[in-house]
Image (tube, rainbow, N blue to C red):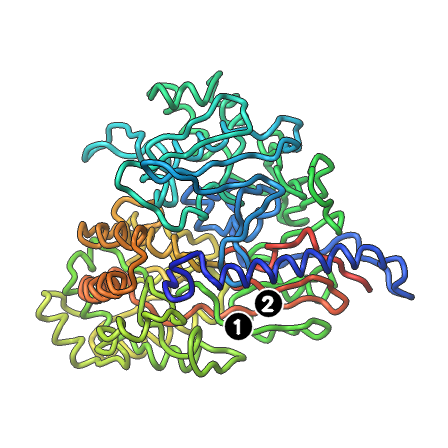
Amino acid sequence: MRNDGAGRDPGSRVRRGALRVAGVLAAGALAGGVLAGCGSKNQVPSIGYAVDAVPVSYNGGSTSGASGGAAAVFSRVLTGFYYTGPDGQPVADTDFGTAKEVPGESQTIQYRLNPDGKYSDGVATSCDDLVLEWAARSGRFTKPGPGGPVPMFDAASTAGYSDIERVECQPGSKDATVVFRPNQRFLPWQTLFNAGDLMPAHVAAEAAGVSNVVAAVQAGDTNALDRLAQFWNTGWNLKPGELDTELLPSSGPYRIESYSDSDGLVLVKNENWWGNQARTPRVVVWPKNTDLKQKLADKEVGVVDVGGGSVPDLNLDGFSVENVPGRGAEQLTLSSAGLFGSAEARRAFALCVPRQALFDKFGHPGFQNESGLGAGPLNSRTVQADSLYYPAVTGPADKYRTGDPAAAQRALAAAGVQNPTVRIGYRKPDDRRAQTVAAIAEACRAAGVTVVDAGTPDFTPSRLGEGAVDAVLGSTAAAPGPAGSLPGIEATAALRTGDGLNFGRFGNGRYDAIADQLAAEDNSTTVLNLDTEAENLLWSEMPSIPLFGTPRTIAFGDGMENGIANPTKAGAGWNMDRWVLSR
């Protein structure tokens, strides 16, 4: 979701977040000097980090990587020019390099990589990495498909990258100039080439048998690009017990050492990292599907970041616990085919979903906010509840607040849908989502709708497009775990025609045009008008049903230094290299 009020200019919110981050880093540096004098307490050499992400790909820019929560796991493994701070804002990572907007006929950004920067395998970071990322995310390179050209690269989102005309780069150089298309602006450019997304081009080049990535992209070499795309799409997939770490070099304070179901995803200090060394030598990531209660009982977890209410009877004694609303939007993403092939059918189903009752029961576990995030049912898919525009543009949601089974039944009949069965999928185990599906089933039964819980432990949102389910219950872009950011790129991508995160395969040319205008617009009156039009369009087309801000439970073990909640796609691990746990 986008928060216009908090930052159409990069804004005070970003500056405030940057100061907050700087304070954490300074505190970490000071703490390092007194660690030896902590009395009887000793620093723990390994910290367990339990997070309900599903790390199926190292490549956070791919559809599978983004939807699986790569940003929550790898932001300090694969660094970039910016990372997502605790308020959801982009924060500059000057260890990696610098980026600045410079004058030009078209919008132009100058990137300079740190001269000392090199991957854990010894290969220098270079502008080749930016060229590969742009090629993959631009949507420019296509191949023949059954219904016409389809993208070679399975990119999560093309936002911003599709507006770039070219990336000027001498192969191997530390400098790149990104030039946007004439008369095209992309205000949230700080979301480009970021942590978790910027992949090692030299690995893809070697695997694909391409000697020069920059030359291949600049020449539009279809054969070379197709081979690069095949690797970019799946070559960085992660499967426990089957890891080739040579394909996974790090550009951050940590690198991947191993991954198995029994021992988790093990991150260790990257000795080739040129910035401040990680404070704790080892972090073990325990992803979703881990028996979290057992890991807690075995004292194997020092940080917890999971959906609020997702694990029943969770005992967090010995932890400092925060229950907070996230930047992600808990929602039902609907298919645009089959049962929900018409907007009339999607609107009819929405009429029986009791959004207010669902918020009251599941939307604010452990917190009670009077305004802003988490204060009520979520009435927008793309404008965040603490935005200045939110109250003015969300009127169309009122019709769908309480649930009206009789009206739903009439609307279904008018749409030619009789006694439908709606299969709702999600990643199990998740107690809150299981109860949410049960509550929807109970409310919609009176409308003649049978709701089936189609959640499974291996569920992925791609099953929606495959026709295996009719709806996905998840956060922004159907994510099972950490989600959302202040600029809201993923929320927009989930609705854009052809984007990878658009799992329901919704397509509306007018919405796409509005999204493009909003990305370039800083006039508040125009933004208000565009947001208003977008809300009316989306509540009419009903590609998804927003329920509430996804609640998060974030906990740090007693004795933890520099643990700061980050209820966004970056998760609590956003600054894991600063963690110190003493016991």
Query: Is mark 2 in CB contact (under 8 Å) with mark 1?
Result: yes
Residue 486 figure quarter: bottom left
Residue at x 30%, y 32% (from the top left corner): 140
Q: Earlier in the sequence, mark 2 or mark 1?
A: 1
Q: For the residue carrying disc 2, how many other residues have a C-alpha within 10 Å: few (<14), some (14-19), or many (20+)? A: many
Q: Quadrant of residue 453?
A: bottom left
254 vs 245, nearest the viewer:
254
Return the x and y of residue 276 as percentages of the image width and height: 72, 45
Q: Secondary structure at mark 2?
A: strand
Residue pointed to by mark 1: 324
Q: Quadrant of the N terminus?
A: bottom left
* Total numbered labels: 2
Residue ID at (35%, 19%)? 219
Image disc number at residue 40: none
Residue 525 percent across, percent down from the top left:
25, 65
The image quarter in which residue 142 lies = top left
Helix, strand or loop at mark 1: strand
> What amino acid is labelled 2 in the image?
Ile
Name the amino acid type tagged 1: Val
Q: Is residue 282 among the parts visible in the rendering?
A: yes
10 Å neighbourhood of mark 1: few (<14), some, or many (≥20)?
Answer: many
Where is residue 332? Give x, y as percent: 33, 64
Q: Nearer the viewer, residue 202 or 6?
A: 6
Q: Position of residue 375 (x, y in %)?
A: 42, 79
Q: CA gap, disc 2 to disc 1?
A: 8 Å
Q: Is 108 displayed left or right of 325 in the figure?
A: left
Residue where numbered disc 2 is placed? 554
520 on left or right of 579: left
Q: Quadrant of the C terminus?
A: bottom right
- Answer above or below: position of 543 versus 281: below
Residue in the picture at 30% in, 50% down: 520
